[in-house]
Amino acid sequence: MGLIPIPVARAQVQLGADLATWRKLRRLTIAQVADRAGLASSTVSRLEHGKGASLENVLRIARALGVLDQIAASLDPYATDIGRMRADERLPQRVRPPRQTR
């Protein structure tokens, strides 16, 4: 797969730290979160230490911590300036790269 871009690696570490903080604020152990998420404790621990996880596992952990709706809402494109500006536009079914002129 190759090297992870630095901004992505930073985001992995930050997301893991934030989920660990949510867990601690809720006074839950890694084992409790893992049980609620239907995952192994090692998976939760790896994510909390910025080692990455599948999107499904991140969302399972977020749900177990009660923050799934906040994560989903944070990605709402219509909650952004550009999304509101283009809300009435008809979006294309797919986006193709521009044609190259010779």
Image: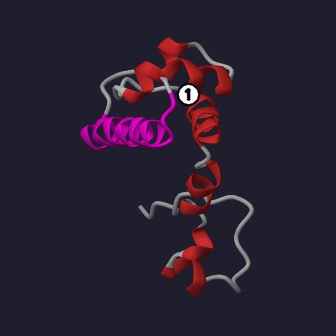
User: Mark 1 highlights which residue?
Assistant: 54
* Residue 18 among those drawn in magenta: yes
Q: Which residues are magenta?
A: 5-28
Residue at left 65%, top 27%?
A: 37
Quadrant of residue 64 in the image? Answer: top right
Please, what is the three-letter code of the amino acid marked with disc 1? Ser
Residue placed most toward the observer, 72 or 42: 42
Residue at left 35%, top 38%?
A: 17
Image quadrant in which the N terminus is located: top left
Q: Is residue 71 left or right of residue 16?
A: right
Residue at left 71%, top 68%?
A: 92
Residue 69 rendering spot, x and y as whole percentages: 65, 55
Residue 39 vs 33, above or below: the answer is above
Q: Is residue 37 left or right of residue 5?
A: right
Q: Secondary structure at mark 1?
A: loop
Residue 8 vs 76, above or below: the answer is above
Q: Is residue 21 left or right of residue 92?
A: left
Residue 98 rendering spot, x and y as whole percentages: 51, 63
Residue 8 rendering spot, x and y as whole percentages: 34, 40
